[in-house]
Amino acid sequence: EQKGERLVVVHTQKMAKSPKEVIEHLRQAGLPNLWVPAPDSFLEVEEIPVLGTGKLDLKGVADLAKQKFCCHR
């Protein structure tokens, strides 16, 4: 939070578990709080961006997350 960063889960289809169930599972697994997303940090998209090579487009994913969760500066 100090740097204005936020963990966001970008996924393509309805999840079998609710965000709250996913969070509880991650906590029970012993993950640090820094690696556990907030319940309002889940973003469903039609497609995960990929590059022409078929690799994950990290900038494209970050841009999707920023559009949904970031304040416009």
Image (tube, rainbow, N blue to C red):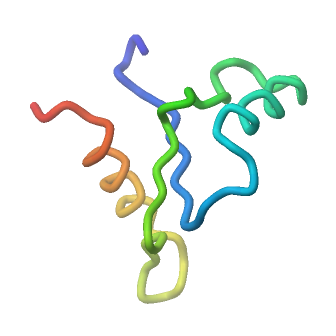
Left or right side of 39 for 47? left
Q: Can you say whether 65 is above or below 27 in the image?
A: below
Residue 24: x percent and y percent? 78, 27
Left or right side of 68 for 71? left
Q: Residue at x 56, y 30 (%)?
A: 39
Residue 54: x percent and y percent? 53, 85
Residue furthest to the left in view is 73
Q: Which residue is drawn at 46% across and 77% down?
A: 50
Q: In which quarter of the image is residue 5?
A: top left
Q: Can you say whether 44 is above or below 30 in the image?
A: below
Q: Can you say whether 25 is above or below 56 in the image?
A: above
Q: Which of 1 and 22 is in front in this view?
A: 22
Q: Quadrant of the N terminus?
A: top left
Q: Which residue is drawn at 37% across and 59% down?
A: 59
Q: In which quarter of the image is the C terminus?
A: top left
Residue furthest to the top in view is 2
Q: Can you say whether 43 is above or below 2 in the image?
A: below
Residue 23: x percent and y percent? 71, 31
Residue 62: x percent and y percent? 38, 51
Q: Which of 28 and 50 is in front in this view?
A: 28
Residue furthest to the right in view is 29
